[in-house]
Amino acid sequence: MKIAVIYWSGTGNTEAMASAVAEGAGAELYSVSQFSGDVTEYDRLAFGCPAMGAENLEEGEFEPFFEGIESKLSGKKVALFGSYGWGDGEWMRTWEEDCGAAGINRVSDSVICCEAPDDEALAACRALGRKLAE
């Protein structure tokens, strides 16, 4: 089974979460700018992106990347995670709804945390990775 964790991080918070998800899943870890593969080669994928602006996905790299591969994710097991610094997680709820509308099968509830992930958030990320690998 081939698993990838692909993320975008501006402050390092989502990167720390991505590392914990990858650890839990035994997955390959890539930032969006490092990923040059084809998502169809992976059985399961986790995606991480923080809330930006008015609770949106990061618009320069991550959102265009995700929109470009979204149609290739149908039938794959997917996990979502990310951090935020304000608001209440609306960006994640919107992202989950968009994934559902695209027929993407999320393995469990997404993991979000405010600012830097604490031990509890990192444990939740490792658990998300394990769930993805099941």
Image (cartoon, rainbow, N blue to C red):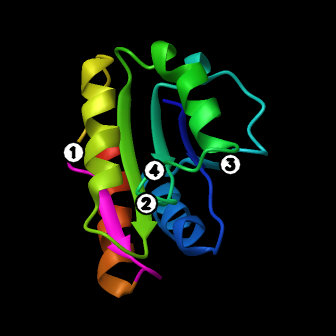
- The three-letter amino acid code for the residue at tag 2 is Gly
Q: Nearer the viewer, residue 64 or 30?
A: 64
How far apart are the two marked residues, 1 and 3, measured between alpha carbons?
21 Å
Region in magenta = 109-117
Mark closer to the chain start, 2 or 1: 2
Helix or strand or loop: what does disc 2 sit on?
Answer: strand
How far apart are the two marked residues, 2 and 4, measured between alpha carbons?
11 Å
Mark closer to the chain start, 4 or 3: 3
Q: Nearer the viewer, residue 61 or 110?
A: 61
Residue placed under numbered mark 1 in the picture: 108
- The three-letter amino acid code for the residue at tag 4 is Asn
Badge 1: residue crowd in 10 Å (few <14, some 14–19, many ≥20) = few
Q: In the displayed structure, would residue 74 be above or below residue 47?
A: above
Q: Residue at x 48, y 29 (%)?
A: 1
How far apart are the two marked residues, 2 and 1, measured between alpha carbons?
14 Å
Q: Is residue 86 magenta?
A: no
- The three-letter amino acid code for the residue at tag 1 is Ser
Q: Residue at x 43, y 67 (%)?
A: 83
Residue placed under numbered mark 2 in the picture: 82
Looking at the picture, how far across and down is residue 13, in whole percent? 54, 74
Q: Nearer the viewer, mark 2 or mark 1?
A: 2
Looking at the picture, how far across and down is residue 102, in whole percent? 33, 17
Residue placed under numbered mark 4 in the picture: 56
Residue 59: image quadrant is top right
Looking at the picture, how far across and down is residue 125, in whole percent? 37, 64
Q: Is residue 70 left or right of residue 80?
A: right
Q: Residue furthest bottom?
A: 118
Q: Nearer the viewer, mark 4 or mark 1?
A: 4
